[in-house]
Amino acid sequence: MSQSDRMKVLVIGGGSMGRRRMRDLSARGDVSVGLLDLRADRRDQAAGTFGVRTFDSLKSALDWRPAALVISTPPDQHAELVELALRQGLHHFSEANIWTVDPAHVESISAQKKLVSAASCSMGFLPVIRELKRLIQQELGTLHGYQMLLSTYQPNWHPGEGKEYYARNRATAAAREMVPFELLYLNDLFGYPRSAAGTVAQRGDLPDKMEDLWALQMVLDNGASAQLTVLMGCPAEARRGICYGHNGMIRFDVMSGIIEREFKNPDVRDQLRLGAIGEVLEEAYRMEIHTFIDAINKKAIWPMPYSRSALSTAALAAAEKSAHSGQWQAVDAAIQPQPLPAAD
């Protein structure tokens, strides 16, 4: 395919996720990749490593006439870039959100202009999550409930960067971001929350004084019970859960990629190994961004519409409101998390 026939894809943001997206897109033979980033060091690195075109202003990047945007900026910058894509008639992919742009608005404009508007769902491409979905749908029977724990240590996130790294700011704190990030795949596996109660607290002794614990109790649309706890102040790392259904129990560990089944009919007690996350994560990212391009080319269907993504961030909003009110809150996609002031 000649250079002029390739789809132009503009990656906005050359941080860790932006570099992944450029790596995987530049490996395709049917796209030309550009990077918009205000930092010269990131532009130079991208040009040298991936051979992409680089831009230091939005005007020059749009003058390149891309067909699609990949929004890999911090989450508090997503909304304005989603709106830009809709106005310009550009397909777009947005990394995981803390706030979701009005899904009815996004999906209405996208339908009118025949755009693929893709909310990220990276974890859904992991082998352990894909197999877990099959087991829940085909073997577990009626779901009774699930529990999920994520513990990851915030100081280990980009230790070489200071306050400019978004996860060290209260409104976009690591623990806060990971609540909807986990719910993106948990909701798809188990069902979407219709109400939630939450606890938000600072339990750890982190250099950045902000909340590091989010705990949610939820009732799902199928009537099942759900619990999600996200910790960022404990140095022990874990990403594991358990679910119960009419036919038995499934334990799952996302980091090790291990699923343990205990079923009664037929009697099954075994362990499935689907690959540790360090072995399979980069392939999941590759599959995700390739699915976005394939969806534009009408060779795939994007699995995470904004209407579903918005319910993950809405559950965060309901939990935070509950933490202040002491009452259960309805999960409403129209009610998104509120901005938070900076930590003292």
Image: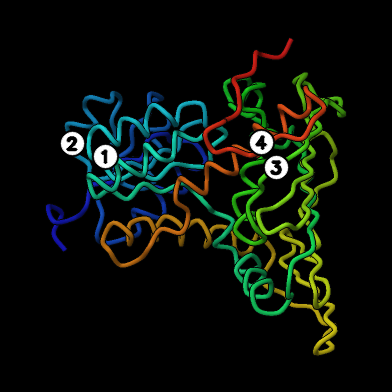
Q: Amino acid at mark 1?
A: Arg
Sequence order check: which comes first, mark 4 or mark 3?
3
Q: Which mark is residue 321?
A: none
- Kind of element beneath mark 4: helix
Is 308 positioned to the left or the right of 64 in the image? right
Quadrant housing residue 185:
bottom right
- Kind of element beneath mark 3: strand
Residue 120 rendering spot, x and y as whole percentages: 49, 48
User: Mark 2 against mark 4, which lies toward the viewer?
Assistant: 4
Mark 1 surroundings: few (<14), some (14-19) or many (≥20) residues within 10 A? some
Sequence order check: which comes first, mark 1 or mark 3?
1
Is 180 positioned to the left or the right of 39 in the image? right
Q: Which mark is residue 195?
A: 3
User: Mark 4 against mark 1, which lies toward the viewer?
Assistant: 4
Q: Amino acid at mark 2?
A: Trp
- Kind of element beneath mark 1: strand
Q: Which residue is mark 2?
A: 64
